[in-house]
Protein backbone atom coordinates (compact mmCIF):
# COMPACT_ATOMS: atom_id res chain seq x y z
CA UNK A 1 0.00 0.00 0.00
CA UNK A 2 1.22 3.51 -0.85
CA UNK A 3 0.10 6.20 1.59
CA UNK A 4 0.60 9.91 0.91
CA UNK A 5 0.58 12.28 3.88
CA UNK A 6 0.02 15.96 3.09
CA UNK A 7 1.13 19.11 4.87
CA UNK A 8 0.99 22.78 4.00
CA UNK A 9 -0.32 26.12 5.06
CA UNK A 10 -3.88 26.97 5.93
CA UNK A 11 -3.78 29.83 3.40
CA UNK A 12 -2.51 27.66 0.55
CA UNK A 13 -5.20 27.76 -2.14
CA UNK A 14 -3.61 26.50 -5.36
CA UNK A 15 -5.75 23.51 -6.31
CA UNK A 16 -3.97 23.21 -9.67
CA UNK A 17 -0.66 22.82 -7.84
CA UNK A 18 -2.15 20.00 -5.77
CA UNK A 19 -3.39 18.24 -8.91
CA UNK A 20 0.06 18.62 -10.56
CA UNK A 21 1.79 17.28 -7.44
CA UNK A 22 -0.42 14.20 -7.35
CA UNK A 23 0.05 13.64 -11.08
CA UNK A 24 3.85 13.85 -10.68
CA UNK A 25 3.64 11.47 -7.73
CA UNK A 26 1.55 9.01 -9.75
CA UNK A 27 4.03 9.19 -12.62
CA UNK A 28 7.14 8.80 -10.42
CA UNK A 29 5.95 6.49 -7.64
CA UNK A 30 2.48 5.13 -8.35
CA UNK A 31 -1.14 5.74 -7.51
CA UNK A 32 -1.62 6.31 -3.77
CA UNK A 33 -3.92 3.86 -2.00
CA UNK A 34 -4.70 6.40 0.72
CA UNK A 35 -4.17 10.08 1.53
CA UNK A 36 -3.73 11.30 5.11
CA UNK A 37 -3.96 14.96 6.11
CA UNK A 38 -4.32 17.11 9.20
CA UNK A 39 -7.78 18.45 8.38
CA UNK A 40 -6.77 22.13 8.44
CA UNK A 41 -8.08 24.58 5.86
CA UNK A 42 -5.79 25.15 2.89
CA UNK A 43 -3.35 22.50 1.68
CA UNK A 44 -4.76 19.72 3.89
CA UNK A 45 -8.34 20.04 2.73
CA UNK A 46 -7.31 20.68 -0.89
CA UNK A 47 -5.37 17.40 -0.88
CA UNK A 48 -8.29 15.60 0.74
CA UNK A 49 -10.74 17.03 -1.79
CA UNK A 50 -8.52 16.09 -4.71
CA UNK A 51 -8.07 12.54 -3.41
CA UNK A 52 -11.81 12.13 -2.88
CA UNK A 53 -12.48 13.47 -6.39
CA UNK A 54 -10.20 10.83 -7.97
CA UNK A 55 -11.41 8.00 -5.73
CA UNK A 56 -8.53 7.70 -3.27
CA UNK A 57 -9.63 7.02 0.33
CA UNK A 58 -8.83 9.83 2.76
CA UNK A 59 -7.95 9.73 6.45
CA UNK A 60 -8.19 12.98 8.38
CA UNK A 61 -6.16 13.52 11.56
CA UNK A 62 -7.39 16.84 12.96
CA UNK A 63 -5.74 18.75 15.78
CA UNK A 64 -7.18 17.99 19.22
CA UNK A 65 -7.22 21.45 20.75
CA UNK A 66 -8.69 20.16 24.01
CA UNK A 67 -10.56 22.35 26.44
CA UNK A 68 -7.74 24.90 26.78
CA UNK A 69 -6.66 25.35 23.19
CA UNK A 70 -3.24 23.90 24.02
CA UNK A 71 -0.46 25.53 21.96
CA UNK A 72 1.21 22.12 21.66
CA UNK A 73 -1.82 20.61 19.94
CA UNK A 74 -0.54 21.24 16.39
CA UNK A 75 2.94 19.82 17.02
CA UNK A 76 1.36 16.88 18.89
CA UNK A 77 -0.84 16.13 15.87
CA UNK A 78 2.21 16.36 13.58
CA UNK A 79 4.05 13.85 15.76
CA UNK A 80 0.96 11.60 15.77
CA UNK A 81 0.84 11.69 11.96
CA UNK A 82 4.53 10.81 11.82
CA UNK A 83 4.03 7.96 14.31
CA UNK A 84 1.14 6.67 12.18
CA UNK A 85 3.44 6.76 9.13
CA UNK A 86 6.14 4.85 11.00
CA UNK A 87 3.53 2.29 12.02
CA UNK A 88 2.53 1.82 8.39
CA UNK A 89 6.18 1.39 7.37
CA UNK A 90 6.63 -1.27 10.06
CA UNK A 91 3.71 -3.12 8.44
CA UNK A 92 5.47 -3.06 5.06
CA UNK A 93 3.66 -0.09 3.51
CA UNK A 94 5.26 2.82 1.65
CA UNK A 95 4.67 6.34 2.97
CA UNK A 96 5.52 9.75 1.53
CA UNK A 97 4.95 13.31 2.67
CA UNK A 98 3.85 15.89 0.09
CA UNK A 99 4.87 19.32 1.34
CA UNK A 100 3.08 22.45 0.12
CA UNK A 101 3.78 26.08 0.92
CA UNK A 102 3.13 26.91 4.56
CA UNK A 103 4.47 28.38 7.77
CA UNK A 104 5.68 27.18 11.14
CA UNK A 105 3.36 24.18 11.39
CA UNK A 106 4.39 22.95 7.95
CA UNK A 107 8.08 23.41 8.85
CA UNK A 108 7.54 21.44 12.07
CA UNK A 109 5.82 18.59 10.23
CA UNK A 110 8.65 18.38 7.71
CA UNK A 111 11.24 18.47 10.51
CA UNK A 112 9.72 15.57 12.49
CA UNK A 113 9.19 13.63 9.28
CA UNK A 114 12.81 14.06 8.21
CA UNK A 115 14.05 13.21 11.73
CA UNK A 116 12.15 9.93 11.39
CA UNK A 117 13.99 9.26 8.12
CA UNK A 118 10.79 9.13 6.07
CA UNK A 119 10.65 10.16 2.39
CA UNK A 120 9.13 13.46 1.33
CA UNK A 121 8.55 15.51 -1.82
CA UNK A 122 7.80 19.14 -2.52
CA UNK A 123 4.20 19.37 -3.63
CA UNK A 124 4.16 22.84 -5.09
Image (cartoon, rainbow, N blue to C red):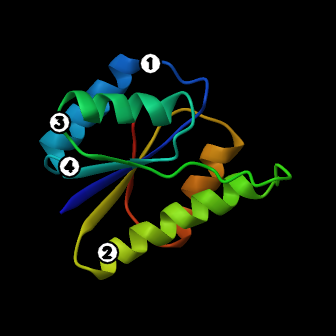
> In the rendered structure, which disc, 3 or 1, sits on the residue that comes first in sequence?
1
What quarter of the picture does the C terminus occupy? top left
Q: Is mark 3 on a helix, strand or loop?
A: loop
Where does label 2 land, which residue? 89
Distance from disc 2 to disc 1, alpha carbons, whole Å, reads 30 Å
Residue 70 falls left or right of residue 118 = right
Nearer the observer, disc 3 or disc 2? 3
Q: In this view, does 6 lie above or below 55?
A: below
> In the rendered structure, which disc, 4 or 2, sits on the residue that comes first in sequence?
4
Pinpoint residue 122: horizontal percent, then vertical percent.
41, 41
Q: Residue at x 67, y 37 (%)?
A: 103
User: On residue 120, which mark appears?
Assistant: none
Q: What element carries label 1?
A: loop
> In the rendered structure, which disc, 2 or 1, sits on the residue that comes first in sequence?
1
Displayed quadrant of residue 86: bottom left
Where does label 4 land, which residue? 32
Displayed quadrant of residue 22: top left
Disc 2 to disc 1: CB gap under 8 Å = no
Where does label 1 land, which residue? 14
> In the rendered structure, which disc, 3 or 2, sits on the residue that comes first in sequence?
3
> In the rendered structure, which disc, 1 or 4, sits on the residue that comes first in sequence?
1
Amino acid sequence: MIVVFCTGGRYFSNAASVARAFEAFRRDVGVPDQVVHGSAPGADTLCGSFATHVGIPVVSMPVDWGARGDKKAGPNRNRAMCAHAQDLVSQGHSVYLLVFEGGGGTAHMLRVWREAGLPWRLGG
